[in-house]
Amino acid sequence: MLSSYGIQLPYVLWSILFSIINGFLMIQSAQKESLTNRVIRSDAIKAVIIGTTFFLTNLFVVLALDLPFESTPFLIYIVTFLLSCIFGTYFVLKLAVNKRLDMGRYVLGGLGLTLVILASDYTAVLILFFPLLEVKPVLLLMTFILTLAISFYSLRFLLQITRETEKVDTNFWVIIGSFATGIALAGIPYLTAMSVLPVINEENPELHLSMLPYALEIVMVWLLSIVPDLFGEQRNQENISKVEVSEQHFQSLFNHNPDAVISFDLNGRFMTANLAAEQVTGYGREELLTMSIKDIVAPVHLSQTLKRFEMAKEGMPQQTEISIIKKDKTQRIVNITGVPIESGAGINGVYTITKDITENKKQSNTIEYFFHYDDYTGLPNRRKFISEVEDSVREQVPFAIYSLDYSRLRTIRDVFGFQVGDQILKELSLRLTTVLPNESIVSRFGGDEIYCLVPTRNQDIQPVLTQLQAILGTPFFVEGHEIFMEMKAGISIYPENGEDPELLIKCADTARASISDNSFHNFAVYKNINLDTSNIEKIIIENELKRAIEQDELTLYYQPKVNSSAMELVGFEALVRWNHPVKGLVSPGLFIPAAEQTNLIVKLEDWVVREACRQLQYWQSTQLKELTVSVNISQRSFANPAFLNNLQNAMAAHTVAASLLEIEITESMTMFNEKETNKKLNQLKELGIRISLDDFGTGYSSLSYLDKLPIDIIKIDKSFIDDLTADQSAMVSTILSIALHNGLGVIAEGVERKEQVSLLHSLGCDNIQGYYFSRPLPPEEVEAKYIKKAV
């Protein structure tokens, strides 16, 4: 039996078991603390638990030696060794989770762990078996070397496991490591005992039992040395596989990308290019690899492009639109996104994704033209004219607005036909643009309404009037007819007659209307002869509206949105109405503009949102439960920091799903503080709320930004629908095409006639809103009309 040699086998097995448990707990604790990436307050508790298991390992070693010891030293041994085990465990845990543990600290940590283990074990031997000490220098040296190796290899494996950043299954290696570490650590107390205690069998001294633990420890050291290598090799193979898959994905994305993907070195020379790059540039891949940025960018954009390339080389992603020259010398407009190529050595190039947007630009410019110019005469339309007036006011350039009336055009159309009248109008427009001073703007508002914006010096309008009269002295020749024209001109002057464009136009119209048919003069300048009482009326309306919100005098009417093809109800637009106790229903055209000029609009629209949510909650149990309700939001409300919070609170208070609510914004809002506006629109989208662009076509935003707006629906403005005929459908058709290209829904507003419905249907627009189907209705009429029957 081994007990005859001074070794009790059961205690040996117990010591090994507890040592394995100790190793497993140590690895698991260090691994969890490292993965959580935070300081765990229970470090001390873990150190006590794991340290106690390590102490039990050593205790079973003492019992396994079967050597005599006294009770008093045994108690001292328990206290001192238990404390040293707890301290050593705490020390190892801290080492394992230290993110800044470099080679120097690793060496010091391994030495420190070796000294802690040997100091604890030899102190225990001294306390318990001092009278039996018999120092064996060779075994003492071997014990130190093996303990040092076990400490370093165990610490290496522990660090390897805890520093595994990817979420992979390490259970197998944790178990293997726990066994190897546990058995190796369990053997160290036996080594210390063999090196200083008489454990050789005196009856058979040739049986060197003391060498058996050393042989086993050498085997365990070998095992501990290869476990990290095997684990590392497995992880390396897994990483290689991932890199290969990632490379395949990249090559697939690179080769099959519909946009040109090109990489440049730091000198701006082509390094790689995909098939799409050949199509965009017209050059073959081999040709491109011999070229640089300077060879392909149009000279007008070269300086800008090189500047952005330098910024990309400094680590700043870039996006810009430039012109490039293809191999066939044609120019194309491209949108380029450039990002730095980073490696361990720093930035060594620039990746670009290049998209040919030439056709989109042409289409956008065409639509832009339709938005701001009359398609027959080529003159600026009302929107463009007002924009020019605003620019002149902003720059404080004195000017006069001329409202021109050529009344004979109506008679000519009646006598000779519309074609003759239109030809005269076109010739008249050409004459006006020719004779008026530089920087003048001649505009057609629609029909025969002609307006001119003319810069003035010293408020001298006589030279302009002379020129306007002179162009009428020459007759118009159309289809063999010699026709003379007559004119009336009403004039308003900035800044004498105001600064608001609409006001100045109205003043010019008023002056023109004051000219009688029998008047000697055919022009009139507007004079401020009437007291403007509008400000007083606005103050009265604002005060009463504030009271109306507080006293529940407001109500919401709901105008249906209908799919004319399926004859199905698709939603409602919530429109606020004011039921004044004395005046009755007050027109929204009076109180909404007054509210918009103050912060009262914020309070008003907050009420509208809450009331719409309340109504949606009520409709949840009816046939209307799946229909959306849209609410109009002004710039002031949208810019309010509490807007999103108030909106979410309203939905939460009435348990309304975000998908049932739609926010309507205007074009002008998207141009105000674009970065913050887009951020807030994206936040609405993340909540699940749909966004529609109201009164589309009446603002001044560029259509090139339409695909960058996080919107869902375009609402075609009523002004386009009013003039919609089979011959005048180009604008609506173009808007529908752009909406389809950007994946947007479309609703036509202000539809009032069956012919409009039919024409819109033929153009592909089925979603309709307007008096043709229904006026805005109070909730009770909505329920009576739609809950029990379909549209």
Image: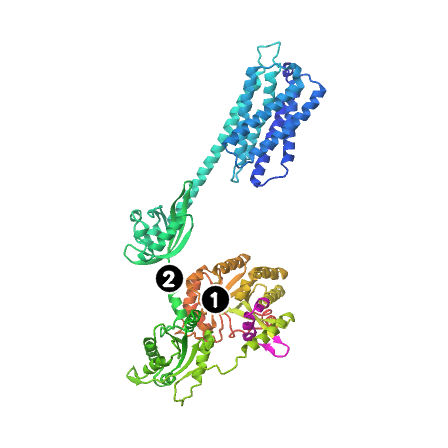
* Percent position of residue 187, x then y: 59, 22
- From the image, tell me which residue sits under label 1: 668
Q: What color scheme is it?
A: rainbow
- From the image, tell me which residue sits under label 2: 361
* Percent position of residue 726, x then y: 40, 74
Q: Which of marks 1 and 2 is nearer the N terminus?
A: 2
Q: Which residue lies furthest to the right in this view?
A: 71
Labels in figure, total: 2
Q: Tell me the mark number nearer the camera, choosing from 1 and 2.
A: 1
Q: In terms of depth relative to the viewer, which is nearer, 311 or 121?
A: 311
* Percent position of residue 412, x then y: 35, 84
Residue 167 on the magenta span? no
On the rendered structure, is 263 left or right of 235? left
Q: Which amino acid does label 1 sit on?
A: Ser
Per the rendered image, the range of residues in magenta is 579-603
- Indicate the quadrant containing the N terminus: top left, top right, bottom left or bottom right: top right
On the rendered structure, is 705 left or right of 15? left
Please identify the quarter of the rendering in which residue 477 is found. bottom left
